[in-house]
Amino acid sequence: KAGVTQTPRYLIKTRGQQVTLSCSPISGHRSVSWYQQTPGQGLQFLFEYFSETQRNKGNFPGRFSGRQFSNSRSEMNVSTLELGDSALYLCASSFGLAGHTGELFFGEGSRLTVL
Amino acid sequence: QKEVEQDPGPLSVPEGAIVSLNCTYSNSAFQYFMWYRQYSRKGPELLMYTYSSGNKEDGRFTAQVDKSSKYISLFIRDSQPSDSATYLCASPPGAGRRALTFGSGTRLQVQP
């Protein structure tokens, strides 16, 4: 069974640009959560989508947005990039809402560098 | 105060040592916790669940919760170089928060 797939794995952008990251969850999983991981802050929750609806949202500015498609694939977008957005962005899928089971299946992440 | 706090390490031990990894939590209402392991350049993977009472053992790994001191521990017996990774404790959703919250992770290096 294929795991969670994230694309692209690495990307470099400049300040002010925008970026879109993609996540394909494990087949049959309906929830997709996004996390930002940095050395200083650790894993920080961005948002969770379930059945194409955003169910939970973390404390990130509106420049961070996401969506989920009918096949459960998800994208997140960051607009007007800032240097501090440089991070590893991790997508995780779960069969039900993540908070119900605590078991998340993570992808390998998309490493974003903002210059 | 973060809901889950963890010493970032790094922690370096010789092969075969017993390793103790610890987290503290602030919300006494939590009923269970998770330990995730993250290898370099990989995403975290669930290692163990532990409920808020007693120990849980899985092979060389034992998870323990001390409710009185709000302490979560993960013990690794006979540590191996393949255990070298970052270990993250995680707490379930709580009041005002509906997502898992992760500690910052402790980086472990097991020297052969």
Image: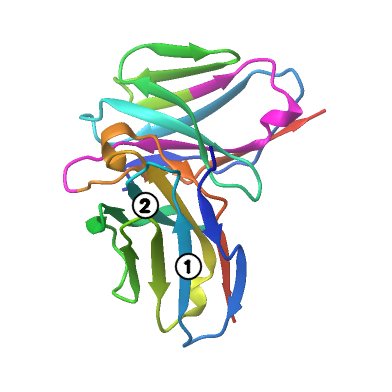
Q: Where does the image place residue A25, in percent across and percent down from the top left?
A: 44, 49
In this picture, is B77 found above or below B43?
Answer: above
| Residue B11 vertical position relative to residue B56 in the rendered view, above or below | below
Residue lying at the far front in this picture: please name it. A71
The residue at the point 36 percent across, 19 percent down is B66
Residue B44 vertical placement versus A65 (above, below): above
Mark 2 falls within which chain? A
Evaluate if marks 2 and 1 touch, with contact meaning CB atoms under 8 Å apart. no
Amino acid carrying mark 1 in the image: Leu
Label 2, label 1: how far apart the Cα atoms are: 13 Å
Expressed as whole percent of the image width and height from the top left, the position of residue A69 reads: 33, 61
Q: Is residue A41 visible?
A: no
The magenta segment? B74-96
| Badge number at residue A21 | 1
Quadrant, the C terminus of chain A: bottom right
Residue in the picture at 64% in, 38% down:
B85
